[in-house]
Amino acid sequence: MCKKSILPEVSHHSPGEVLKNLKNIRHLKIELPGGELGLNSEIVMKWRAEFGSTLENCVILAASSLTKEGDVCEGKHSESHRGHGENSVSVQDGYGSIPESFFTNGGLKLRVVWTISSLIAASARHYLLQQIILDHPTLESLTLADADGQGTLCMSKQQLIDFRNKPIAASASSNRTQVPALNIRLWYAPWLDLPEGSVMEGATLIAIRPSEQLVKKDTESLLVNSFEEPFNHAAGSLVKGRTYLLEMNSF
């Protein structure tokens, strides 16, 4: 007997509609057909966020490009060569330094734009999940990813309980959860070699947490384990460098 796929019949429905007749779901992973961020084809962007009733943490790994080592040597891209021979700006403690050109040539501004875009995408996904969470009280874990591999939103059993017990604060301007005031730490390297021979140019690691939240001792482990190879290697290398600190108001 030939099995007929049901995907064409449900592809136009929301996740909530598809799941409404299913009961006693404990672990759920939803994959969107694509990421929300409209990026230049060369830009690499990965984010992972955890939510309860609001954002608890978010980690972003990004780069202006990911190329084979030979392409960089031939000079096809320029960001990895910026700052050679220039003065460096010392920011906090660490083992490296952030080139002055990062601040003067728009590098920092671009990373702020990437950060805001990722947070908007994550908070919109969180808002999308509210009815699913309320309709399925047996859920113990929930993940919302996308087929492009851009971002992953995760909620644990305790975070799901917090969500149900405390109503979310919606943004006044759009269908997303309001992002709280934030403390942001940023690590940057003009170039970063990866184990398989590729090079991340303009490699950036961004760690985000609410301003009122205490810093956890296992923060470095969280940063490194947020991504799969080779990107967890990149995160582990970047976190050893100097840190740039920023603050962001709620939006």
Image (cartoon, helix red, strand yellow):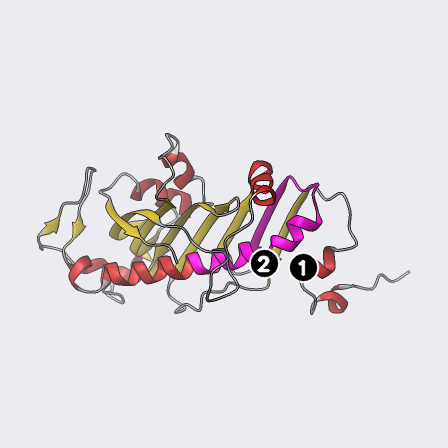
**Can residue 72 be seen here?**
yes
Work out whether 193 lies above or below 15.
Answer: above
Q: Nearer the viewer, residue 57 or 213?
A: 213
Q: Quadrant of residue 68?
A: bottom left
> Where is residue 251 drawn, in percent x and y?
39, 58
Is residue 127 magenta-colored?
yes
- Residue type at numbered disc 2: Leu
The earlier-in-sequence mark between 2 and 1 is 1
Is residue 155 magenta-colored?
no
Would residue 185 appear left or right of 163 to someone viewing this image?
Answer: left
Residue named by callout 1:
15
Residue reaching furthest right? 1
Tell me if mark 2 has few (under 14), some (14-19) or many (20+) residues whose alpha carbon lies within 10 angstroms of its own. Answer: some
Q: Nearer the viewer, mark 2 or mark 1?
A: 2
> Where is residue 241 drawn, in percent x and y?
24, 41
Please name the residue shown 39% across and 69% down the image. Answer: 40
Which span of residues is magenta-colored? 119-146
Q: Quadrant of the N terminus?
A: bottom right
- Residue type at numbered disc 1: Pro
In contact (CB < 8 Å): disc 2 and disc 1 = yes
Q: How many numbered discs sit on the rendered protein? A: 2
Please name the residue shown 61% across and 53% down the image. Answer: 130
> Where is residue 111 drawn, in percent x and y?
30, 59
